[in-house]
Amino acid sequence: MELDPATLEQTAVYKILISSVVPRPIAWVSSIDAEGIRNVAPFSYFMAITDNPPTIAFSSSPRAAAPGAERGKKDTLRNVEATREFVVNIVDDALAEHMNLTSGDYPPEIDEFALAGLTSAPGVKVKTPRVAAAPISMECKLARIIPVGNAPANLVLGEIVYFHVRDDIYDAATGRLDMHRLRPVGRLCGNLYTHVHDIFEMKRPGTTYRG
Ligand SMILES: Cc1cc2nc3c(=O)[nH]c(=O)nc-3n(C[C@H](O)[C@H](O)[C@H](O)COP(=O)(O)O)c2cc1C
Protein backbone atom coordinates (compact mmCIF):
# COMPACT_ATOMS: atom_id res chain seq x y z
CA MET A 1 0.00 0.00 0.00
CA GLU A 2 1.38 3.43 -0.96
CA LEU A 3 -0.16 6.42 0.80
CA ASP A 4 0.54 10.07 -0.08
CA PRO A 5 -0.70 12.37 2.72
CA ALA A 6 -1.11 15.18 0.16
CA THR A 7 -4.00 13.25 -1.43
CA LEU A 8 -5.69 12.00 1.75
CA GLU A 9 -8.44 13.46 3.94
CA GLN A 10 -7.04 14.91 7.17
CA THR A 11 -8.80 12.28 9.31
CA ALA A 12 -7.24 9.50 7.23
CA VAL A 13 -3.77 11.01 7.76
CA TYR A 14 -4.46 11.26 11.50
CA LYS A 15 -5.49 7.60 11.70
CA ILE A 16 -2.40 6.36 9.82
CA LEU A 17 -0.04 8.56 11.84
CA ILE A 18 -1.35 7.57 15.26
CA SER A 19 -1.42 3.91 14.23
CA SER A 20 2.22 4.11 13.08
CA VAL A 21 3.86 5.86 16.03
CA VAL A 22 3.02 3.31 18.70
CA PRO A 23 2.93 2.84 21.58
CA ARG A 24 2.91 6.47 22.64
CA PRO A 25 3.50 7.56 26.22
CA ILE A 26 0.76 9.70 27.73
CA ALA A 27 1.37 13.11 29.27
CA TRP A 28 -1.49 13.54 31.71
CA VAL A 29 -1.18 17.29 32.01
CA SER A 30 -2.50 19.15 35.03
CA SER A 31 -2.87 22.92 34.85
CA ILE A 32 -4.84 25.76 36.42
CA ASP A 33 -6.46 28.83 34.96
CA ALA A 34 -5.95 32.38 36.23
CA GLU A 35 -8.69 31.80 38.88
CA GLY A 36 -7.10 28.54 40.03
CA ILE A 37 -9.68 26.14 38.50
CA ARG A 38 -8.00 22.76 38.18
CA ASN A 39 -7.72 21.01 34.82
CA VAL A 40 -6.25 17.68 33.81
CA ALA A 41 -6.20 16.09 30.33
CA PRO A 42 -4.19 13.44 28.45
CA PHE A 43 -1.88 14.17 25.49
CA SER A 44 -0.10 11.36 23.65
CA TYR A 45 1.72 13.57 21.18
CA PHE A 46 4.32 13.58 23.95
CA MET A 47 8.09 13.17 24.17
CA ALA A 48 11.23 13.81 26.19
CA ILE A 49 13.59 16.14 24.31
CA THR A 50 16.75 16.61 26.37
CA ASP A 51 17.93 16.01 29.94
CA ASN A 52 20.07 19.18 30.05
CA PRO A 53 18.00 20.88 31.30
CA PRO A 54 15.31 18.17 31.56
CA THR A 55 12.78 19.19 28.92
CA ILE A 56 9.61 17.50 27.70
CA ALA A 57 7.03 18.45 25.08
CA PHE A 58 3.43 17.71 24.24
CA SER A 59 1.31 18.95 21.40
CA SER A 60 -2.20 20.36 21.73
CA SER A 61 -4.33 20.20 18.60
CA PRO A 62 -7.17 22.68 18.17
CA ARG A 63 -10.45 21.68 19.78
CA ALA A 64 -12.91 19.86 17.51
CA ALA A 65 -15.69 22.19 16.29
CA ALA A 66 -18.95 21.94 14.38
CA PRO A 67 -18.48 22.14 10.58
CA GLY A 68 -17.77 25.75 9.59
CA ALA A 69 -17.13 26.88 13.18
CA GLU A 70 -13.67 28.04 14.28
CA ARG A 71 -11.57 25.51 16.20
CA GLY A 72 -10.47 27.05 19.49
CA LYS A 73 -7.63 26.25 21.88
CA LYS A 74 -7.97 23.47 24.44
CA ASP A 75 -8.20 24.46 28.11
CA THR A 76 -4.75 23.02 28.86
CA LEU A 77 -3.08 25.25 26.27
CA ARG A 78 -4.96 28.36 27.45
CA ASN A 79 -3.97 27.60 31.06
CA VAL A 80 -0.31 27.06 30.19
CA GLU A 81 -0.26 30.30 28.22
CA ALA A 82 -1.80 32.12 31.22
CA THR A 83 0.29 30.61 34.05
CA ARG A 84 3.47 29.54 32.15
CA GLU A 85 3.59 26.26 34.07
CA PHE A 86 2.06 22.77 34.13
CA VAL A 87 2.61 19.29 35.56
CA VAL A 88 2.96 16.08 33.55
CA ASN A 89 1.65 13.07 35.47
CA ILE A 90 2.36 9.50 34.32
CA VAL A 91 -0.61 7.16 33.91
CA ASP A 92 -0.28 3.63 35.28
CA ASP A 93 -2.68 0.68 35.01
CA ALA A 94 -4.63 1.78 38.09
CA LEU A 95 -5.21 5.30 36.71
CA ALA A 96 -6.15 4.41 33.11
CA GLU A 97 -9.93 4.80 33.57
CA HIS A 98 -9.49 8.09 35.41
CA MET A 99 -7.26 9.37 32.61
CA ASN A 100 -9.87 8.41 30.03
CA LEU A 101 -12.58 10.29 31.95
CA THR A 102 -10.50 13.47 31.84
CA SER A 103 -10.29 13.39 28.02
CA GLY A 104 -13.91 14.57 27.67
CA ASP A 105 -14.59 17.96 26.09
CA TYR A 106 -15.61 19.76 29.29
CA PRO A 107 -16.09 23.53 29.64
CA PRO A 108 -13.22 25.45 31.31
CA GLU A 109 -15.17 26.00 34.56
CA ILE A 110 -15.34 22.24 35.22
CA ASP A 111 -12.77 21.03 37.76
CA GLU A 112 -11.56 17.82 36.11
CA PHE A 113 -9.87 16.50 39.27
CA ALA A 114 -13.29 16.52 40.97
CA LEU A 115 -15.02 15.13 37.88
CA ALA A 116 -12.69 12.14 37.68
CA GLY A 117 -12.58 11.54 41.45
CA LEU A 118 -8.90 12.45 41.65
CA THR A 119 -7.09 13.82 44.67
CA SER A 120 -4.61 16.56 43.95
CA ALA A 121 -1.38 17.32 45.79
CA PRO A 122 0.34 20.71 45.81
CA GLY A 123 3.33 21.48 43.64
CA VAL A 124 6.69 22.31 45.21
CA LYS A 125 8.06 24.71 42.58
CA VAL A 126 4.81 25.44 40.70
CA LYS A 127 1.32 26.53 41.80
CA THR A 128 -0.23 23.82 39.62
CA PRO A 129 -1.39 20.73 41.56
CA ARG A 130 -0.38 17.22 40.55
CA VAL A 131 -2.36 13.97 40.52
CA ALA A 132 -1.57 12.59 43.97
CA ALA A 133 -1.93 8.94 42.91
CA ALA A 134 0.34 9.22 39.86
CA PRO A 135 3.56 7.19 40.18
CA ILE A 136 5.55 10.06 38.63
CA SER A 137 4.74 13.76 38.33
CA MET A 138 7.01 16.29 36.66
CA GLU A 139 6.55 19.94 37.56
CA CYS A 140 7.31 22.09 34.51
CA LYS A 141 7.91 25.73 33.76
CA LEU A 142 6.95 26.72 30.23
CA ALA A 143 10.04 26.95 28.00
CA ARG A 144 8.25 27.87 24.79
CA ILE A 145 5.24 27.19 22.60
CA ILE A 146 5.84 26.48 18.92
CA PRO A 147 2.90 26.55 16.49
CA VAL A 148 3.31 23.68 14.00
CA GLY A 149 1.42 22.95 10.81
CA ASN A 150 -1.77 24.31 9.28
CA ALA A 151 -4.34 23.98 12.07
CA PRO A 152 -1.97 24.81 13.85
CA ALA A 153 -1.06 22.37 16.59
CA ASN A 154 0.89 23.98 19.43
CA LEU A 155 3.99 22.18 20.65
CA VAL A 156 4.42 23.03 24.33
CA LEU A 157 7.97 22.65 25.68
CA GLY A 158 8.41 22.55 29.44
CA GLU A 159 11.52 22.48 31.59
CA ILE A 160 11.12 20.02 34.45
CA VAL A 161 11.92 21.86 37.69
CA TYR A 162 10.86 19.09 40.10
CA PHE A 163 10.23 15.33 39.97
CA HIS A 164 7.86 13.45 42.29
CA VAL A 165 8.58 9.71 42.12
CA ARG A 166 6.73 7.14 44.23
CA ASP A 167 9.24 5.65 46.69
CA ASP A 168 8.72 2.00 45.72
CA ILE A 169 9.64 2.55 42.07
CA TYR A 170 12.91 4.43 42.69
CA ASP A 171 15.95 2.14 42.70
CA ALA A 172 18.65 4.05 44.58
CA ALA A 173 21.31 1.48 43.64
CA THR A 174 20.99 2.06 39.87
CA GLY A 175 19.32 5.52 39.84
CA ARG A 176 16.68 4.07 37.52
CA LEU A 177 12.97 3.62 38.02
CA ASP A 178 11.71 0.04 38.27
CA MET A 179 9.83 -0.66 35.03
CA HIS A 180 8.14 -3.74 36.51
CA ARG A 181 6.66 -1.68 39.34
CA LEU A 182 5.84 1.43 37.29
CA ARG A 183 3.29 -0.32 35.03
CA PRO A 184 2.76 2.60 32.63
CA VAL A 185 -0.01 2.64 30.03
CA GLY A 186 0.73 3.37 26.35
CA ARG A 187 -1.65 4.75 23.75
CA LEU A 188 -2.15 2.90 20.46
CA CYS A 189 -4.81 4.11 18.01
CA GLY A 190 -8.57 4.57 18.25
CA ASN A 191 -9.62 3.42 21.73
CA LEU A 192 -6.73 0.95 22.10
CA TYR A 193 -4.03 1.03 24.78
CA THR A 194 -1.23 -1.25 25.88
CA HIS A 195 0.17 -2.31 29.23
CA VAL A 196 3.92 -2.54 29.74
CA HIS A 197 4.05 -6.03 31.23
CA ASP A 198 6.35 -7.78 28.73
CA ILE A 199 9.82 -6.34 29.26
CA PHE A 200 13.08 -7.65 27.79
CA GLU A 201 16.72 -6.59 28.01
CA MET A 202 19.31 -6.02 25.27
CA LYS A 203 22.80 -4.86 26.18
CA ARG A 204 24.31 -2.23 23.87
CA PRO A 205 27.54 -2.93 22.04
CA GLY A 206 30.40 -1.04 23.73
CA THR A 207 30.55 0.20 27.29
CA THR A 208 29.98 3.97 27.07
CA TYR A 209 26.21 4.03 27.53
CA ARG A 210 25.38 6.08 30.65
CA GLY A 211 21.72 5.10 31.09
C1 LIG B 1 -4.98 8.88 25.48
C2 LIG B 1 -5.35 10.20 24.87
C3 LIG B 1 -4.37 10.94 24.24
C4 LIG B 1 -4.67 12.20 23.70
N1 LIG B 1 -3.68 12.90 23.08
C5 LIG B 1 -3.94 14.15 22.61
C6 LIG B 1 -2.89 14.92 22.02
O1 LIG B 1 -1.74 14.49 21.92
N2 LIG B 1 -3.19 16.17 21.57
C7 LIG B 1 -4.44 16.70 21.71
O2 LIG B 1 -4.67 17.84 21.31
N3 LIG B 1 -5.46 15.99 22.28
C8 LIG B 1 -5.23 14.73 22.73
N4 LIG B 1 -6.24 14.01 23.33
C9 LIG B 1 -7.56 14.64 23.49
C10 LIG B 1 -7.59 15.59 24.71
O3 LIG B 1 -7.29 14.88 25.90
C11 LIG B 1 -8.99 16.20 24.82
O4 LIG B 1 -9.20 17.06 23.70
C12 LIG B 1 -9.25 16.96 26.10
O5 LIG B 1 -10.61 17.32 26.16
C13 LIG B 1 -8.43 18.23 26.23
O6 LIG B 1 -8.78 18.80 27.46
P1 LIG B 1 -8.63 20.31 27.84
O7 LIG B 1 -9.54 21.13 26.94
O8 LIG B 1 -9.04 20.34 29.27
O9 LIG B 1 -7.19 20.69 27.62
C14 LIG B 1 -5.99 12.73 23.81
C15 LIG B 1 -6.98 11.96 24.43
C16 LIG B 1 -6.66 10.70 24.94
C17 LIG B 1 -7.75 9.88 25.60
Image (cartoon, rainbow, N blue to C red):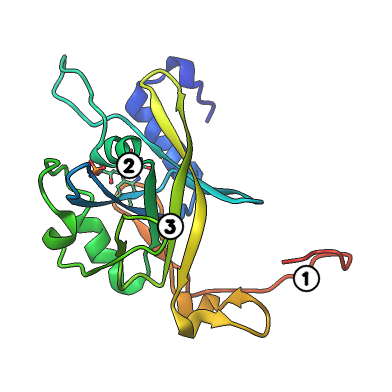
| Total marks placed | 3
Q: Is residue 50 visible?
A: yes
Q: Is residue 11 left or right of residue 113?
A: right
**For residue 83, which numbered disc appears in the image?**
2
Q: Label 1 neighbourhood size at 10 Å, few (<14), some (14-19), many (20+)?
A: few
Q: Where is 194 relative to 45, above or below? A: below
Residue 111 at x, y percent in the picture: 14, 53
Q: Nearer the viewer, mark 1 or mark 2?
A: 2
Q: Is residue 27 visible?
A: no
Residue 99 at x, y percent in the picture: 27, 59
State the quadrant of the C terminus. Answer: bottom right
Mark 2 residue type: Thr
Determine whether the residue tagged by mark 1 lies in a helix, strand or loop. Answer: loop
Q: Label 3 neighbourhood size at 10 Å, few (<14), some (14-19), many (20+)?
A: many
Residue 148 at x, y percent in the picture: 46, 25
Mark 2–mark 3 Cα distance, whole angstroms, equals 13 Å
Choose the circle earlier in sequence order: 1 or 3.
Answer: 3
Are dots 1 and 3 in contact, CB under 8 Å? no
Q: Look at mark 3 in the image and give the residue it sits on.
A: 139
Mark 3 residue type: Glu
Residue 64, quarter of the rendered image: top left
Q: Look at mark 1 in the image and give the residue it sits on.
A: 203
